[in-house]
Amino acid sequence: MPAPAPRSARRSGRARLAPLAALLCALAPPAGADLPAPRVMSDAPASRGAWKMEMLEVNGAPPQGAQAFASGLTVCMTAAEAMSRSEQANRGRCDARYLENTPERATMEVNCPGEPPSRTRSTVTRDGAGAFRVDTESVRGDRTDRARVRMTYTGPCDKDAGVISLGKDSPVCRNASAQIAGMEASPRCAEDRARCERELTQLRARVASLCK
């Protein structure tokens, strides 16, 4: 069975996910902080739907590094909004407002209570036909996360779908498939086939829900 990923690798993954979470907070603000769609996105589909996300920059990381991590990343904004509304009951009311809202550019700010409170500011500009660029900065306590993302609408999605999915050929999904293959061929799996099959079933289900 392959050894688990080193702690440094897991920390690196979490560091890259943090600004993505900030981006979702801005684009799918919680209940009580609803904003009308920004004017710059007036020709986007009415449904929040699914969006392909191209990570152009994450906390100053070179673009190629961010793109490799998030290759094939799609976010279901419909599900993200539903999840955000569900979490709202535990966090208190957030305040959202536009600092700028024109046909060319929108800047929105979301302030949420908590220990510590958080502030997320995002700027949306058009970036080609059916595509938008979003620059996000999120501050929570002494941590600041920044992300620059290009998002393109890919179609509707259901509120009960997973919030995030990755392409089957993404590095994360290829690594997961290799882990499954390693488990299947390991001596440990041969020694305790029943337990191994239970673990493999759970792992395959997680991979199937993420890698589409």
Image (cartoon, helix red, strand yellow):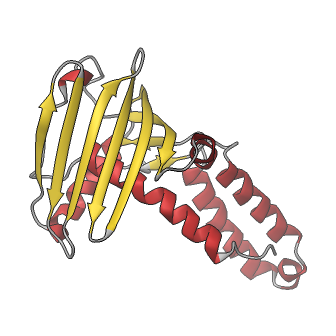
Residue 48 x, y percent position in the rendering? 30, 34
Q: In this view, does 49 lie to the left or right of 57?
A: left
* Depth check, front residue: 118 or 89: 118
Counting from the top left corner in percent of width and height, residue 35 is at 13, 39
The image shows a total of numbered marks equal to 0
In this rendered view, identify the residue nearer to me: 93 or 8: 8
* Residue at 89 percent of width and 69 percent of height: 185
Where is the N terminus found, in terms of image quarters?
bottom right
Tell me residue 39's x, y (percent).
Answer: 18, 23
Quadrant in the picture for residue 168: top right
Which residue reaches farthest bottom?
191
Q: Residue at x 38, y 30 (%)?
A: 133
Query: Taking the image as drawn, is residue 125 in sight?
Result: yes
Quarter where residue 167 is shown:
top right
Residue 181 image offset from top left, x and y in percent: 82, 62
Please name the residue shown 54% across and 50% down the image: 61
In the figure, 101 relative to 3: above or below?
above
Horizontal side of residue 88 vs 156, given as left or right = left
Query: Nearest the camera: 18 or 160?
Result: 18
Q: In this view, does 33 lie above or below 40?
A: below
Residue 35 visible in rendering: no
Given residues 191 and 116, the one toward you in this image is 116
The C terminus lies in quadrant: top right
Specify whether 129 is left or right of 119.
right
Q: Relative to 118, is 170 above or below?
A: above
